[in-house]
């Protein structure tokens, strides 16, 4: 019987793989919450010549429209949140650990996006500390904090609803 998969084994395997899409959905929702918080920061932060950071995001495809910046930013936040859920969701079920993971995740996205991808695409020096990147670090920490906290809250709320019958 070593080559046969029992029903208990199959349901255990399927329950582990089924958690990934759920964590992706929870992460995407958390990413939107984090993205709104970060977007507000970027809409009011003007580290360069009175230009809002959200308008700088719009510059990635060559636009200067703040609405385009918001759409681009929230799309990235949705992807980043879903990735958080897939990669770290199993570790982010409790609030304290989720916040720590979220803050670290925000720093990773800051390094990838604000220090490397965005400046490279805009013809600016990469991995440079300046007023834009320092303000962006704050924005990414807000994103990570909100993603982690929101993910944990969703996980705890869904765990209470989907737990064993009492």
Image (spheres, grey):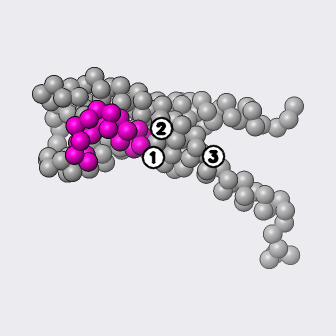
Tell me: residue 87, above or below residue 56: below
Q: Which quarter of the rendering shows the N terminus?
A: bottom right
Which callout, 2 or 3, points at the residue further toward the start of the chain? 3
Task: Write down the quadrant of residue 41 in the picture.
Answer: top left
Which callout, 1 or 2, points at the residue further toward the start of the chain? 2
Task: State yes or no: discs 1 and 2 in contact (Cβ < 8 Å).
Answer: yes
* Residue drawn 76% across the image and 57% down it: 12
Residue beneath label 2, please?
A: 31
For label 2, the SS is helix
Question: CA gap, disc 1 to disc 3?
Answer: 14 Å
Rendered image: mark on residue 22: 3
Question: CA gap, disc 1 to disc 2?
Answer: 7 Å
Give the crowd class for mark 3: few <14, some 14-19, many >=20 residues within 10 Å.
some
Rendered image: mark on residue 79: 1
Image position, residue 82 (x, y; %): 51, 45
Q: Which residues are magenta?
A: 56-77
State whether residue 115 appears in this view: no
């Amino acid at each position: 019987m070593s080559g046969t998969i029992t029903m208990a084994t199959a349901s255990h395997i399927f329950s582990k793989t089924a958690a990934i899409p759920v964590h992706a959905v929870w992460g995407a929702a958390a990413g939107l919450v984090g993205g709104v918080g970060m977007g507000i920061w970027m809409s009011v932060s003007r580290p360069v010549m009175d230009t809002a950071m959200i308008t700088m995001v719009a510059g990635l495809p060559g636009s200067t429209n703040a609405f385009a910046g918001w759409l681009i930013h929230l799309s990235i936040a949705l992807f980043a949140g879903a990735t958080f859920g897939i990669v770290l969701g199993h570790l982010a079920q409790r609030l304290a650990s989720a916040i720590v993971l979220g803050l670290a995740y925000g720093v990773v996205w800051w390094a990838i996006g604000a220090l490397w991808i965005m400046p490279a695409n805009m013809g600016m020096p990469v991995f440079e500390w300046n007023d834009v990147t320092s303000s962006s670090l704050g924005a990414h920490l807000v994103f990570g904090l909100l993603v982690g906290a929101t993910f944990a809250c969703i996980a705890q709320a869904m765990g209470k609803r989907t737990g064993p019958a009492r």
